[in-house]
Image (spheres, coloured by chain):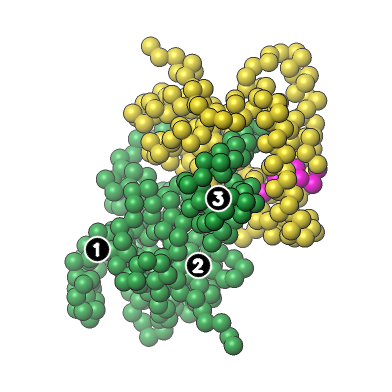
Chain colours: A yellow, B green
Amino acid sequence: MTNWSDLNDEQLVEHIVQRDRDAFGTVYERYVQSVYTLAIYIVGQREAEGAAQEVFVHLWRKAEQFEAQRGSFRSWFMALARNRLRDARRRLNYQEALLPPEEVEALLTAVDQANMRNDAHNDVLETTWHSQRRGAILQALQQLPANQRQVILLAYFGGYTQAAIATQLGWPLGTVKKRLRLGLQKLRSSLLNRDQVLDLARPIHADKEP
Amino acid sequence: MNCDWVQERLEEYAFGLLDGAEETTVSAHLPTCPTCQALLTDYQEILGLLPEAITAVKPTPVPDSLRAGIFTAIEQPTDTQSNSQPPWYRRLLLPVNGLNARRWRLATAVSLLLLLLSLGWGIQQNVILARERAQYNQILEFLERQELILEIIDSADTQKQYLQPVTNTPDAYGRLYARPDINTFILFAANLPEPPPDQGYQVWYGTNNEIEYGGPLDVNKNGFGLLIFNDNESGLTFDFAQVAIQPLDDLTTGSLVLLWERPKPN
């Protein structure tokens, strides 16, 4: 009997292509929290469940489109989820971004405080692969200048265009573009230097240069 | 196109924030350049981790009904043309969670309606319309907005706009039908090449400041497709309507195929 939790994402997808519901259920359990959280931010509380459902149903029906040599299942699936959610948002005719400024502040505060909590958590409990990865990305986010972190969270979670971010924050558009670029570049640099997260995000047997 | 130009835009591309032409250019460059592709892969890996990181610091309870809804949905039979939708006669009855159910049902049902009409489309238009009406009468009884469709296409107040080809499909064309007192619009296109299996035609419309998604344009084997969509306002208040061919799982990239633009004042 297969212990599905022992398989990595890429191995599970191969079974999902064969229409294995247990494998699909395992992937669901691994990603539902991330997808649902993303749905809350992009389409709002009221539509989040339906939109998240659509994401997973799309995965079930299009799992064969995943190509392991092009990157990890995580990056592929989260990009797919975000695109489907943004598509759902457009079909809902949402004119404005759903993430109000106070929610952004709360998110930034949570990220700022996460490092201290995460250290305490790791002191007391485990240092699993997942908590290490989360800790690494959170620390990398915290190490960004606040204005770069703000732009990244607004762009990714808030459904803001760069022009909308510029309007919201009162910055020139060129400044927003620059901070978005620099922020993502610094995240990459930070995570490569830690020699953890980008390798942890890739498939186990992928053969790629960092 | 050189890598410096592309890499200056890769971060925006990873976020899905590039505008149409630049996005298309970057998309075209990536398969030809392992360096740029590897850099984009790194960015996508990082962005893919953000939801997990945010979930850890700001968890949101997942409804118990979500799993049941998903596993019920994947049990639904799919038609042979599209694995993402049940057959049209079930789509008329099944709710679509989180979406505009009426618009979706009508758009897909009428798209299939046109499959039955496609044989007549190569003949002269007056003959086509006569045949269409006869077939409409048989099929429209299943549609909940039959009268509305005919009212939009065939009334004295109908506004008709012509969509011109903008890519290497000079024989393709489209028409947009609107009425000043109705917020439902009909767009059809003809002579469209069959899209690759992983791509599809999509309809977009809007103004210079806002772009709206009209919906998918399903095309039959004769290159004909029709879409019915709604807007918040009645009449032709938008400045453009277009048909683009795009990856099915990425509506942020693609190429423009047909375009109508409101003439700009001198």
Outermost bottom residue: B266
Q: Identify whether A88 is placed above or below A209.
A: below
Would you say residue A153 sits in the magenta stretch?
yes
**Both labels 1 and 3 in a single chain:** no
Q: Identify whether B19 is placed above or below A110.
A: below
Q: Tell me the element at label 1.
A: loop
Q: Residue at horizontal 52%, vertical 82%? A: B263
Q: Residue at horizontal 48%, vertical 41%? A: A55
* Residue indicated by mark 3: A86
* Residue A142 visible to an observer of this rendering: yes
**Both labels 1 and 2 in a single chain:** yes
Query: Would residue A170 appear left or right of A87 to someone viewing this image?
Result: right
Part of the protein shown in magenta: A146-155
Q: CA distance from mark 1 to mark 3?
A: 31 Å
Image-quadrant location for residue A19: top left
Image-quadrant location for residue A25: top left
